[in-house]
Image (spheres, rainbow, N blue to C red):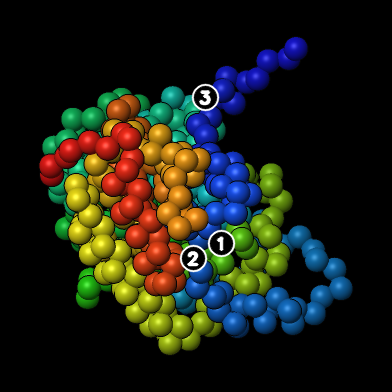
């Protein structure tokens, strides 16, 4: 029998999706499953974006330019300039989701065996993208005790070796909801320039920033034109995860030309997705104001409800719509499976994402889960009640102190 590739064997399974079969079985039993495990908002996609697809009058759905529709890139350039990121249409490539933008970044900038430093916990699929590109992830641990702030510069410098070629950040952060400050980004600038590295900045949650805070982009760092690769997506900003449209942005012409070769090999990004993405740029401010208020209400309720539960600690996220929560449990993977297989409260249960899948360092995250507060407030209240009752009877419960 032919053998599976080494790369295939090394490719990690998604910690977010691997529990799906257990959720399906729970639903087949007639249980209501509250999905706190995945960043799939229940917010409506903007009406203008949906109408653009319905009204797109074409006889043939053709390939677009490998970099994406020119009209979209030009319009996207104006969007970025409106938030003080000065790029033109030639410095933007439309990608098949933010995932492809990250993959292109790794393939264009890094050789097999090169290393990237990533603050953990981090978006679990970074491990997958790195594995596919033959890149080694070097984790640097942020902690819940410090609300997952950026580790000190000295800790980064201690990890830099001859194969270290970049740093990856997600700002605001998935899975923690932490918002990196301008000062923290400036500290990364120092490291990147000193060691002639890349800074890969995943900013797909830029619009979700709370409590009067402001988002500072890596593209706004001075003197970093050749070093910064920005990865972006319409999925969360416009609640359009299924359209699979993202963007790869850099002012480094050599990197863009190299990434274009990978883009040409996959021909073009999705046409209908680009129509939605372009139209979504006309979304009125009222839409975002309403979404902001909705997420603030959900976040505040969730944080308060979790911290009232015995042995639970939940920091207050400043961005995105996730938080990593410490629970009085011995194994988050076993707990998440137990919730789906064995537990029900009033014929309901919850699905959470075990946080150990967001760490690269073995053994970390065993008593933490990621929760996405993407459900309407009524469902979120029910989900919190279910989780509270589950923790009271979970056989693997432990006594923890922060």
Q: Position of residue 317 (x, y in %)?
A: 26, 60
* Residue 184 in picture, x, y percent from top left: 19, 54
- Quarter of image, res 97: bottom right
50 up-or-down from 24: above or below:
below
Q: CA distance from mark 3 to mark 1?
A: 27 Å
Q: Which residue appears farthest toward the top when viewing the image?
A: 1
Q: Residue at x 22, y 36 (%)?
A: 398
On the image, numbered disc 3 is attached to which residue? 10
In the picture as drawn, the residue positioned furthest to the right comes out as 59
Q: Secondary structure at mark 1?
A: helix
Q: Secondary structure at mark 2?
A: loop
Along the polypeptide, which appears first: circle 3 or circle 2?
A: 3
Residue 217's x, y, as percent? 32, 62
Extreme residue in the front direction: 346
Identified at 52% across, 34% down, the residue is 13
Label drawn at residue 241: 1
N-terminal label among 2 and 1: 2
The answer to whether residue 18 of the structure is visible from this angle is: yes
Q: Which mark is residue 85?
A: none
- Which image quadrant: the C terminus? top left
Residue corresponding to mark 2 = 41
Pointer 2 with pointer 1, Cβ within 8 A: yes
Q: Would you call the spot at circle 1 few (<14 residues within 10 Å), some (14-19), or many (20 or more)?
A: some
What distance separates the C-alpha of mark 3 from that of mark 2?
A: 31 Å
């Amino acid at each position: 029998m032919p053998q599976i590739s080494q790369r295939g064997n090394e490719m990690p399974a998604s910690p977010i999706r691997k529990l799906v079969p257990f959720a399906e079985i729970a639903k087949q039993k007639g249980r209501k499953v509250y999905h706190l495990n995945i960043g799939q908002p229940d917010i409506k996609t903007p009406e203008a974006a949906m109408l653009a697809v319905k009204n797109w009058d074409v006889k043939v759905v053709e390939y677009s330019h490998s970099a994406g529709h020119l009209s979209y890139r030009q319009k996207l350039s104006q969007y970025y300039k409106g938030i003080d990121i000065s790029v033109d249409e030639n410095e933007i490539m439309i990608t098949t989701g933010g995932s492809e933008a990250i993959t292109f970044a790794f393939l264009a900038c890094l050789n097999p065996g090169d290393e990237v430093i990533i603050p953990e916990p981090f978006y679990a699929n970074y491990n997958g993208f790195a594995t596919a590109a033959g890149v080694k992830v070097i984790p640097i641990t942020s902690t819940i005790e410090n609300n997952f702030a950026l580790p000190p510069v000295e800790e980064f410098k201690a990890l830099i070796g001859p194969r270290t070629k970049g740093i990856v950040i997600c700002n605001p952060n998935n899975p923690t909801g932490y918002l990196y400050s301008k000062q923290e980004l400036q500290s990364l600038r120092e490291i990147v320039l000193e060691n002639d590295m890349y800074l890969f900045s995943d900013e797909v949650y830029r619009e979700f920033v709370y409590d009067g805070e402001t988002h500072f982009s890596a593209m706004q760092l001075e003197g970093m034109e050749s070093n910064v690769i920005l990865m972006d997506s319409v999925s969360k900003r416009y609640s359009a995860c299924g359209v699979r449209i993202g963007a790869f942005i850099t002012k480094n012409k050599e990197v863009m030309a190299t990434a274009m070769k990978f883009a040409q090999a996959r021909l073009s990004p999705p046409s209908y997705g680009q129509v939605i993405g372009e139209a979504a740029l006309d979304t009125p401010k009222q839409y975002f104001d309403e979404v902001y208020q909705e997420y603030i209400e959900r976040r505040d309720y969730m944080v308060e409800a979790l911290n009232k539960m015995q042995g639970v600690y939940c920091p207050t996220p400043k961005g995105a719509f996730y938080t990593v929560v410490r629970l009085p449990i011995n194994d988050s993977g076993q707990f998440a499976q137990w919730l789906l297989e064995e537990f029900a409260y009033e014929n309901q249960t919850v699905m959470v994402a075990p946080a150990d899948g967001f760490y690269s360092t073995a053994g970390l995250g065993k008593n933490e889960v990621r929760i996405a507060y993407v459900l309407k407030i009524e469902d979120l209240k029910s989900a919190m009640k279910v989780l509270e009752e589950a923790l009271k009877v979970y056989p693997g419960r432990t006594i923890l102190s922060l």
